[in-house]
Amino acid sequence: MIDESKYTYRVSAAGRVNLIGEHVDYCGGKVMPAALSLRNTIYVRPNGTDKINLAWTDIPARITLEIGRLGEYTHVKYANYPAGCAYLWQQAGHEIVGCDMLYDCTVPFGSGLSSSAAIEVSTIAALATLAGETLDPVQIALVAQKAECEYAGVNCGIMDQYAAACGKKDNAILLDCKTLVREYVPILLGDYTLVIANCNKPHSLVESKYNERRAETERALELLQTKADVTCLAELTPDAFGRIAYVLDGEGKVKDRARHVVEECDRVRRAAGAMKRGDVGTLGELLNASHASLRDLYEVTGAELDALAAAAQAHPACAGSRMTGAGFGGCTVSVVQKEGVADFKRTVAAKYTAKIGYEPSFYDCTVEDGIIVTKL
Ligand code: GLA
């Protein structure tokens, strides 16, 4: 039990599920994530020193960071994320107040639901709150993304940190990753609801494969720019891409990677329209098509996510299902008829376990705000 009376603020940021728009944020595309009730919460109080004392509810480690030496902790297990964020926030010109921080994370690690973004964004939000700043969630997201790239070495896009910071209860965020213009789209699914399932594949090589995909899209852009006046892959319509895709012939998988990005951007546009109309059938078909493209063209799914999505898609109560996040393991998101959810979970778990040899997990969660600050 956490004794809240000992702390000054409770500051949390959300894990996220991405409904559609996968592997397009770093290509200037639109994405549609939603912030979850699975979150990282920090209990924080000023301690009058020039140190930050870190503690965790589920890890016995206790680590002290010196505010004057924040750049030196990037290799310290557990502390690297908080330290990296505090350091980059400080570098961005913000005051860091000495404090005690207790971390309590309910986003499962390695689930593809962005526990790292939740930790990063809540760390910066807690520090800014203690320093008496008015929070600017977009700015916090940008610094958190920088921290992820600089100390985790993952050349990630802005989607996760943006969702962790700027999410809105019961809404998806339709975010243009090129301009950072966003629109909130109410998640109106009628008799249907979202179900998130983890394939529970042990983590492997996500970072290196992620950076490799990103490099392939950069190569594609470079070649396509010899034929089209575009600044990013997302600016190409599927038709325009079709006319010039021949420049990618002989480049191995690069053409498939680019095709995924271009077509996924088009699916996001159609999915946003379907969601606004409450057209669950179309939304579901787009989710299925997104998964197929991530499997066949972008090749970031793997046997486990494919088995989980296939089992979900085959269930009569399911309108559509796809992997969410970077892939190579982690979670699927499915749109499922509310009254069929219990049978869906049972049937999908049984089929998946029979094929893969271990069980998936299901998370009961809701769509919530990004950053939440409570004075205690
Ligand atoms: C990870 C990255 C995001 C995004 C997704 C794939 O979650 O952090 O920026 O690229 O993968 O859509």
Image (spheres, grey):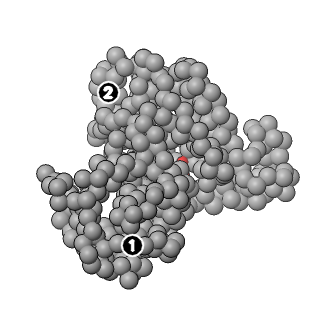
Percent position of residue 349, x then y: 31, 31
Percent position of residue 373, x then y: 35, 51
Relative placement, left or right, of 38 versus 328 is left
Quick check: 183 above or below 230? above
Of residues 57 and 46, which is closer to you in this image? 46
Distance from disc 2 to disc 1, alpha carbons, whole Å, reads 46 Å
Identify the residue at horizontal 42%, vertical 36% (top origin): 169
The residue identified by callout 1 is 96
Is the residue marked by circle 2 packed among few (<14), some (14-19), or many (20+) residues within 10 Å? some
Identify the residue at horizontal 46%, vertical 57% (top origin): 135
Percent position of residue 163, x then y: 48, 47
Relative placement, left or right, of 180 versus 92 is right
Relative placement, left or right, of 96 versus 326 is left
Quick check: 236 above or below 210? above
Name which quarter of the figure residue 127 lies in: bottom left
* Whether residue 21 can be seen here: no
Quick check: 233 above or below 310? below
Is the residue marked by circle 1 packed among few (<14), some (14-19), or many (20+) residues within 10 Å? many
Which residue is at the far right? Answer: 227
Q: SS class of the residue under badge 1?
A: loop
Percent position of residue 220, x then y: 72, 55
The residue identified by callout 2 is 345
* Residue type at numbered disc 2: Lys
Of callouts 2 and 1, which one flags the residue occurring earlier in the amino acid sequence?
1
